[in-house]
Image (cartoon, helix red, strand yellow):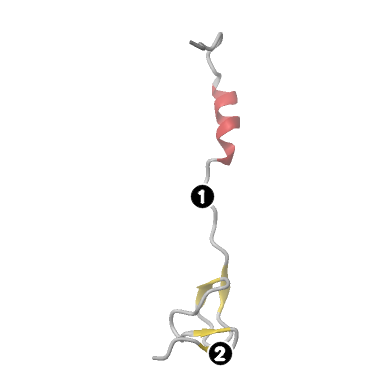
Amino acid sequence: MAVPKRRTSKTKKNMRRTHYKLQVPGMTTCENCGEMKLAHRICKSCGQYKGKVVVGE
């Protein structure tokens, strides 16, 4: 069975873990109402996507 020869130092451990982070979602403003929305998705407040009403109120 494989066993490490040396203990992994704090620096090496933290260097390995630098990519373990949450990604920030791509937020944009809606062209119609100005609310913040996720990119490439329907606006939750007005129901528009690319200038067209997709979801009626």
Q: Residue at x 58, y 37 (%)?
A: 18
Q: Residue at x 57, y 77 (%)?
A: 29
Q: Residue at x 50, y 11 (%)?
A: 3
Find residue 6 and report its image quarter.
top right
Residue 39 in the image: state x and y as whole percent.
57, 71
Q: Nearer the viewer, residue 41 or 6?
A: 41
Quick one: SS at disc 2? strand
Where is mark 1, residue-wise? 22
Question: Does residue 35 lie above or below 9 as drawn?
Answer: below
Question: Does residue 50 lie above or below 16 as drawn?
Answer: below
Q: Which mark is residue 35?
A: none
Question: Does residue 34 lie above or below 38 as drawn?
Answer: below
Where is mark 2, residue-wise? 52
Find residue 27 and report its image quarter.
bottom right
Dot 1 or dot 2: first in sequence order is 1
In the image, farthest residue toward the left? 57
Residue 11 in the image: state x and y as whole percent.
59, 25
Three-letter residue code for mark 2:
Lys
Question: Does residue 37 lie above or below 13 as drawn?
Answer: below
Q: Tell me whether the residue at label 1 lies in contact with that at label 2, contact meaning CB atoms closer than 8 angstroms.
A: no
In the image, farthest residue toward the top? 5
Three-letter residue code for mark 1:
Leu
User: Which quadrant holds the C terminus?
Assistant: bottom left
